[in-house]
Image (cartoon, rainbow, N blue to C red):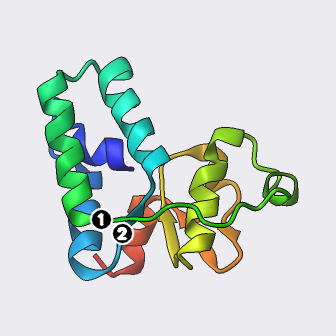
Amino acid sequence: MLVAAFYKPIYGPSFSKDVYDYVVEHSKAYVSVNIIKEVHRTLREKLKFSVQDTEYFLSLIQQKTNLSEISTHHPNLLKETGLRDPNDLRVLELAINVDANFILTWDKDLLVLNQVNVTKIMTPRIFWTTLGF
């Protein structure tokens, strides 16, 4: 969702940005060093952002989120959840470590899980709807 929040579609406003702004203003949002690295890679390599734009967007993310390291790894989490993409394990571990209420994502490999421990996994659209918007 972080990438979608800062990647303005050509034909309209970014819905993910509205959700991101709401979350960081009304709650606590967490990222890890690994997630920041993944956002950086996606912005530069997939979306071809300039170095300057990438650094700007990363600074915005870091200003409004809490940086948390994954202090406890969960070696059986991949098997227990049936997670299809092992690269998403760091997102789940971060959520568990910070006792997150939600993971907001467009990632289908995470969305199929629906919930891990107490953390509900949903799209930004569903989250927005549950708030009554």
Identify the image quadrant of residue 71.
Answer: bottom right
Q: Residue at x 42, y 78 (%)?
A: 130
Q: How packed is label 2: few (under 14 Cα within 10 Å), some, or many (20 or more)?
A: some
State whether residue 9 appears in this view: no
| x then y, percent, for residue 40 | 34, 34
Amino acid beneath label 2: Ala
Which quadrant: the C terminus? bottom left
| x then y, percent, for residue 70 | 57, 61
Amino acid beneath label 1: Thr
Identify the image quadrant of residue 74.
Answer: bottom right
Q: Are marks 2 and 1 in contact (CB under 8 Å)?
A: yes
Q: How packed is label 1: few (under 14 Cα within 10 Å), some, or many (20 or more)?
A: some
| x then y, percent, for residue 59 | 18, 48
Q: CA distance from mark 2 to mark 1?
A: 5 Å
Mark earlier in primary sequence (2, 1): 2
Image height check: is 95 above or below 11? below
State whether residue 32 appears in this view: yes
Q: Residue at x 28, y 63 (%)?
A: 19
* Dot 1: element: loop
